[in-house]
Image: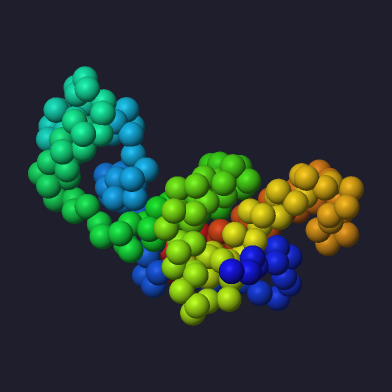
Amino acid sequence: MRQEPTCLKGQSAGPGGAGITPPMDQLELAAAKYQLGRQTGEALRDLGIALISEGHDQAVRLAIVEDLTMAEVGPIFERVCREMGQAIPPLDQAIDIVIAAQLSEIAEGRVGPEMGLRKLMEDVVSPHVTGESQTGRYTFAGESRGLQHLVGAYWGYDELRARPSEVSLAGRFGDEAIEMLDKEVVGFARDWLRGSGSPRI
């Protein structure tokens, strides 16, 4: 699988799943992360506490659980979801929900571009999207979800940091190149969100 070149002018990142918008509801996002196996017992207990503070009494048991193993917390979380009318999304939908949420954080400046991109790769791309892109239908890694430019940028960070005096971006080296790549990543994130129909960008 080829990696998308980092600096391609005149191209914009493709959309993700049609109609997917960054989830506004923390329970929906938590359910999507749960489906992807990216939750911890501590994070779900914290969610329960937050839900209680918002007046959702269904989350009481989740908020006070002491055994934080997922074997214990998982079934409690699933019950909270059922009682609050939140389905655990199927895998394909969960992938798009988490992608949209994490790209929103990058696009809105709530997380640094490089850090946010590395989390996206760790949580979603490497465990779930890479396999989709190896089916033979796509040219670039991440293309199945319109993430090829972001995957290319991810590897671009590594190259720029490993060989700062040899590898350049648009004629710039070192910290200047990293700064330029940060801006490109924010742009790619915004392009993806616009392509997915997000009203938030």
Which image quadrant for residue 100? bottom left
Q: List x then y, in percent, for residue 117.
A: 57, 49
The quarter of the rendered structure image containing the N terminus is bottom right
Question: Is 19 placed above or below 86 here?
Answer: below
Q: List x then y, in percent, for residue 76.
A: 15, 35
Does residue 140 appear left or right of residue 69 in this picture? right
Which image quadrant for residue 81? top left
Question: Is 84 placed above or below 70 here?
Answer: below
The residue at 25%/57% (across/down) is 89
Let me know if residue 193 appears in the view: no
Q: List x then y, in percent, for residue 75.
A: 15, 38
The residue at 10%/44% (across/down) is 83
- Colouring mode (rainbow / by chain / secondary structure / one colour): rainbow
Q: List x then y, in percent, for residue 190.
A: 56, 61
The residue at 14%/50% (across/down) is 85
The residue at 63%/53% (across/down) is 154
Question: Is 18 placed above or below 73 here?
Answer: below
